[in-house]
Each structure stands twice: as C-alpha cells, then as structure tokens.
Image (cartoon, rainbow, N blue to C red):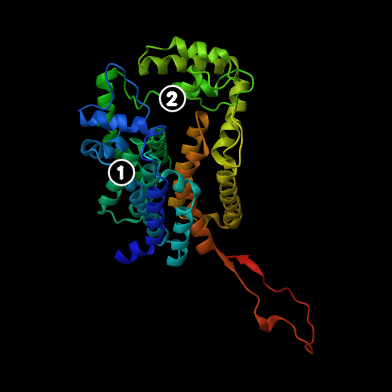
Amino acid sequence: MKKLILSFLPITLLYALIVFVFGSSELSGDEHRYIKYATNLTQGYFVDPANIDIRNGPMYSVLLAPFVALGTPLWVPKLLNVVFLTGALICIYLTLSKYTRPRVALISAYLMGLYPQSFKWVGRLYSDAFAFALICVCIFFFVRWVHAQEKEWKWGILAAVAFAFLALTKLIFAQVLTVCIVLSVLGLVIFRSHLAWKSLFSVLLAYVLCLPYLGYTYSITDKFPLWGTNGGEQLYWMASPYEGELGNWVDNASVLEKRIPELNPNHFDFYTSLEGMSGIDRNKAFLQKGVENLKAYPQNYLKHWIANMGRFFLNYPYSFKEQNMGTFAYMIPNMIVLLLVAFGSFVVFNTWKDVPTEFWLLLLFISIYIGGSSLVHASTRYFWMIIPVLTVWLGWIFGSKLKIQILRNSLIPTEGDDFVEEKLPVAEHIS
C-alpha cells in the first residue's frame, strides 16, 4: 500500500498546491449552505424546523461539522478533498488492475485525476469531490462483491454503505438508488441469477441505511420518503414557457434582484409570491407551476431537455449567459472523452459477450443517473460523476481488447529485394 500511495504522490501534491494557492479564505456560492448545515449539526439539528429547506443531503455537512466546531481555517477541511480525490484514483487503479495490466490501470487512473473538474472542485467546500470519491469506492467494492465467495459478505455490505453515503450526499443518487432497487427486483424475477441476488442485497441494504435520515425528514415534515426540497424549482425552470429560455436553473437572487434584464418579469412576480413560505411549501408551489407549464407547453420542455443534455455533455447552451473561452475548458475534454467512448464501443461491438457482466451493470448505473439528471437541472459539473465508470470501461478496452501491431523492419522491402505485393497488418483489435 505504501508503494501504491507513493505512485500517486505527484498528483496528490498537485491537488494540495491548488488548495493552498487558489483556495479562497472566504466562503462563496453553495459553500455557505454546506457550512450552515454543518453549523446546525453542531447544535443538534440539520435544518431549522421553522423553515424547512433541504437542498442537499446531510453527509458532506456531517464531515464539515467537526471543523466548524473547532473553528479551523477553511483550508483545513478543503484538504479533505485532496484525500478524497487521491483515494478515488487508488480505487479505480485497484479495480482496473483486476482486468488489465498495472501500467494501464495506473495511466488510466492518472488521466481520470487530470480531468479539469478535479482541479475546479478540489479547492472548494462543495460535496462534488466527496461524491466523486464515493462513486469510485462504490465501483471498487461492487466489483469485489461480484467476484467474492459466498461467505465474503463484507464486500456487499461495504458497497451498500458507500452507496448510502452517496445517496445522502447528492440527492440525485437517492433517486438512482430507488430505480436500482426496482431493476434489481425485476432482474431477480427474470434471470434468477446469483448476481441479481447480490445487487439486490447491496441496494436494499443501502436504502435501509438511509432510513434514519428519512425518518428524520418525516418527523419534521410528515412526508415519506422526503429526500430534499429542491426538485420543484428545477422542474419549474425546465418547464418554463417564456421566449429565449433554455431550461437552465436561475438562482433566487438573480430573479429577485433582477440581475438578468432579459428574464421574463413573470418569474419575478412568481418568486415574490413565494416569499415567507417554508422550503416545503415553496417546493410544492414550484412543482405545481412546473407541472402546469409542462402540460400546457410540452414542446418547450422537450427543447429544454435537449439543451439540458447539451449542458451535461458539452457545457452548452445556457440562456441569458454570455459564452466565453471558459466554455471550452470543459467542452473540449468532454468531446475527447465522448470520442474515446465511441471508439471503444466500436472496438467491443463484435465481442460484446466478452464484456464482464459487472461492467454492464456499471453502465446501467450511470445511464439511470444521466436519465434522471436530464429531466431537471444538469450541467457539465454532473458529467464528472460518470467519469469513473467511463475510465473503467476505457481502461479495460484499451488495456485488454486493443492491440496495435507495428510493422517490423524485416517486412519492409529494400533495394534488390523482389517485390511481392501483400497486405501487411497495421492495426487490429483482438478479443
């Protein structure tokens, strides 16, 4: 393990350098919310019962709570992101090492670690780096669980714990967890396979581990299961019928302070009508308005859904936002990843039966996530969450399914040799 940690020391130091050089000493954006929830936890509650507003799960704020209680400088909890990302790379390396050569696994893990979103979020008190690491941990434990002997229940339990933590960090994964339970039950009924049993065990246990949180939200809202109170507002913007909009979410302050002159004034009127409401009532009002607009203008929702997928994969387009060169910082790397995925799909097209079954399940996992994200608010920030699964797929394809044959010098005709026309092997993919 010591040698493994040393292998990732260069990128670990790079992450730490970013925290110290570019990390701000003041809170900004959603950092305020995470710290607020963490402060609440130090006082014995997660959200204020008098103003229930749950915009993210509690798990990341649980990690921040000790630092808030101790009053540490912001750079101290930010260093947790360095640990999370390094741990994520190690998990992917160990996972890929089961399927391909260690050198290929190491290169694949490093390439994943150099993805631009890593540098953006490592120096911020957002839950993204933690969620990214949890996905990698889920992959590692799930693969171990698939290949485990009957008595090695620990891998299934650890996979469930990681999935539960993920669902309690990014609430979109709570919806993914629910869908996974349904599909696991269907898989067990249809295929009656041992793998279906293992999948169902882990996802059911993960849901059970989330029940204390759901019990807490029920105790303050009388609603079950209530994961959060932000979905209605996202649907509101996705179903908005006004000209010039593309369905991307607009923050509360930009609407109420009229920071976007092009924004339809009806948004301001609707937002002001919600002032004084609790988060539960606001979410209900947003949801009702969103459903109303969806039914009245389904073609707008379809247009916004297409734009949403563009934002997820390519960081474009956004309404009422001037595009700049920063768009390419994520668009170009994402295009490279998508081209590699397309090429990798071509490589395994005729040999798809050789693909490990667990890889298909990982692909199903991110497909559910992409599908859920596409229905509400999405951005290229969320594309980062599927990079670990794509890294495993591409690392296996390029490390085990693809071989480049270089022409030997002895095959190249020289002066005086009789020329014989023949087709020389240049490149091929092998099973």
Of labels 2 and 1, the one closer to you: 1
The picture places residue 83, in percent across and down from the top left corner, at 33, 51
**Is residue 194 at least partly visible in the picture?**
no
Compared to residue 22, the image places residue 267 above or below, namely: above
Q: Residues within 10 Å of mark 2 (few under 14, many from 20)?
A: some
Give amino acid for label 2.
Gly
- Where the N terminus falls, by quadrant? bottom left
Disc tally is 2
- C-alpha gap between disc 2 and disc 1: 28 Å
Front position in the image: 290 or 252: 252
Residue assigned mark 1 = 77
* The C terminus, quarter of image: bottom right
Q: Badge 1, how many Cα within 10 Å: few under 14, some, many 20+?
A: some
Question: Depth check: 144 or 352 in front?
Answer: 144
Element type where label 1 sits in the image = helix
- Label 1 is placed on what type of residue? Pro
Q: Is residue 75 left or right of residue 338?
A: left
Residue 406 appears in view: yes
User: Where does label 2 land, which residue?
Assistant: 231
Callout 2 touching callout 1 (CB < 8 Å): no
Query: In the image, what residue occupies the spot 25% across and 51% down?
Result: 154
> Could you say whether the residue bearing mark 2 is in a helix, strand or loop?
helix
- The percent position of residue 328, horizontal first and vertical second, equals 59, 44
Above/below status of 109 relative to 265:
below
**Which residue is found at the position 48% from the left and 33% from the top?**
372
In this orientation, which residue lies closer to the viewer: 239 or 27?
27
Horizontal and vertical percent position of residue 27: 37, 35
